[in-house]
Amino acid sequence: MGITSLMNIAKNSMLAQQAAIQVTSNNIANVNTEGYCRQVADLREGSLVPAEFGLLGTGVRVAGLVTYYDKFLETSIANKNTDLQQQNAEAAYFSRIETVISEDNSNLAATITDFFNAWQALSADPTSYAARNDLVTKGENLSRIFNNLYNDLSNLQMEIDKSVEGEVGEVNRLSTGVADLNGKIIAMNATNGEDADYINERAQLLKELSGKIRITAFEDQAGGLTVQTADGKTLVDRSTQWNLSTQPDPDTGFRRIAWEDGSGNPRDITDEVGGGKIKALVDMRDGHLQNGFIKDLDGLAKTIVTEVNTMHALGYNQKGKTDVTFFRNMGDNFAGDMGLNAEVKTDVRNIAAASASTDTTGNDVALKIASLVTQRLTINGQATTLTSYVSNIMGKIGEFTKNAEQLSEQQQSAMTMMERQREGVSGVSIDEEMSNLIKYQYAYQAAARLITVADEMFTDLLGVIE
Amino acid sequence: MRVPDSMRYNLFMLRTNRVKSGIDRVQEQIATQKKVLRPSDDPAAFCTCVRVSSESSLYKQFGSNVKKIRMYGTMYDTCFTTINERLATAKEITISYASGELPDSLRNNAVDQMKDIIEHLVTLGNTVIGDDHIFAGKKGNMPPFQLDENYSVAFVGSSDVAQVFVDKDETEELGISGNSVFYDGDKNVNIFKTLKGLMETLENDDPSQTSKYIKEIDDCMDLVSRNAACNASRVQQMEVLAEEDTTRQAGFSKIISETTDADLAQLAVEYNSLSTIYQALMSSMSKMEDLSILHYLK
């Protein structure tokens, strides 16, 4: 025991407090860093030295850094993020479809009624050029609205398809990142190194990854993380990563998602994605749009075109001619290609309102066509009136959007709760850090004072000798 | 429980955004005066609105058809009155002739009057509204009565009359065919034939035929009166339908209004409430720093 040991204790203490202040500073600096886990310097008493009267302390040392990290909470947050991102994407796209389809923007029901009202007006005045011209205008309006709706929904579908490709690229980037970090963590663990930052970073990547696609992840003893898709296809195993890719569907041309096995052979996993933003995109593109609203719209257009054309072709126009269709002949894409027959468009006398060649001023056919709007017709296998069918489409998109927005809010609330819990453990509190800062600063000042005391003691001792 | 700073700010932003979106929504509702702005606001209400609006539009067209029938009815009524007046004139001439009150000069004048009556009735029979000859039946694009130099009149219109919808699945004849106005095959009435016969009788100075023609003119007037009565009844029926349509349109407006119109008083209260919450949030946030230890360390 000597004055030098006092100096050593003071020096160690100053270094330890300085390290603690550095850790605190790092916490303060990362107060707004997403996913950061606060750290605390683990101060331990220095080793004891035997003296005549017992064991004497040798000061303080930094035993290590304690990282506040709850593995189970991080896993729960990652899982919740799958549902949250899926619902957010669905809510966003349903909202866009709603904007396109909503009657206030599309005027679909009103235009259908106007079109058949124009047939009524023609029936009341079959020889009127004004009524015939008005009918052509209403027919063109109806065609344009179907074309526009179809194009808007198709463009949205293509935009979603591009997003699928982008998101798959993101999955590959994230899984590569997880594999890299796995390698670093395993290496650190092997040398008992500090791997907290890597674990934090990996947890963030995992959270992002689970937002894209439903995954399961488990950690081995060495700290390596294995990540698999919902149907068990491995994306990451320790530092090895497997790619996802997209392949065009031969029927629709839209991208299918494939998992590439060890030999690089793609296996289609589109239907097994399980959750996340990619599932929302695929469901939206193939389900709600292709087999949903676009199909509904096309079925409606098909029924109108077919019913009107059938009756019109049986009628006689003012030139005494029959077998002329009102709408042009089109392939399978009724909504997208809907348009008037050129003969009708260029000469309104070609509109057939009469049922007999001898009665070219009659109105029987016009009446029959006008009555279609109140009749129950079969649209996509459903017996309903045209306007009821349209209002059902509006109701459907309304329900989907409302439901998706509610689910999105629920998921957001649940995520907020979880993040609060996580932040409760790992988040940085400025008040807490400032208190620690003061605590360590005082300790540092006291240790510095100890050096002054030891120095004075040395001076006194040297004075005695002199 | 520890409350880290980032969570405090994140939650503040989350809550602020919720309140702000609420304010935006209420503002939009106030501006549009509608509580249902898009299908997702209330899918069932939006559907009802679309259906009712379509029905309303459809019934407006029925209303337009009814209006047209009424307009034609008014025109027919005027025509029938004039036809009867002209037939009454013809009857007066016949009675005067039968009573021997017409000297030759006046008889020749009466022949001219009869020709004039026939021409007038042909003109009435060819009455046009817009481009439509109202007595032509389904052949409304051409005059239904043709007068030749001998004052014989031929009906070249159609006996069939165009139907129009006045309600769902309910049609009504738009007009009246001249065939049923000037001819009645069952009772052997033919107005133009009677007038022509009378004209020839006057020309040939053959008083023996007068009583026959007086009876025929009576039959003709009876036919016109029957048509006028039918027309009046039809017009009345259309007026009832028009009234029904007015009531129905009011009903549609009421349904749409009740389904979608916003209660402005309620929205104003809601807006004030949200504004207060927003201000309180801003105020609490601006004072958040005061609660930090940093505030005391200054």
Image (cartoon, rainbow, N blue to C red):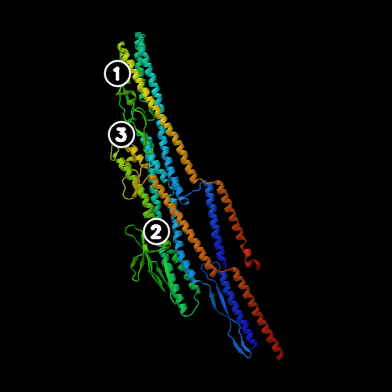
Q: Which residue is mark 1?
A: B150
Label at residue A360: 3
Task: State the image coordinates of residue B54 (x, y, percent, origin top left).
Answer: 42, 42
Dot 3: element? loop
Residue A341 shows up from this direction: no
* Chain letter of the residue carrying label 3: A
Label at residue A283: 2
Residue A244: image quadrant is bottom left
Amino acid marked by disc 2: Asp
Residue A140 shows up from this direction: yes
Q: State which quarter of the image contains the N terminus of chain A.
A: bottom right
**Labels 3 and 2 share a subunit:** yes
Task: State the image coordinates of residue B48 (x, y, percent, origin top left).
Answer: 44, 46
Residue at 28 percent across and 35 percent down: it is: A356
Q: CA distance from mark 3 to mark 1?
A: 31 Å
Sequence-wise first label, 3 or 2: 2
Q: State which quarter of the image contains the C terminus of chain A.
A: bottom right
Amino acid marked by disc 1: Asn
Is B67 situated above or below A268? Answer: above
Please state which of residues A248 and B240 is positioned toward the viewer in this rendering: B240
Task: State the image coordinates of residue A431 (x, y, percent, origin top left).
Answer: 60, 69
Amino acid marked by disc 3: Thr
- Kindly report which numbered mark, 2 or 1, lies closer to the viewer in this rendering: 2
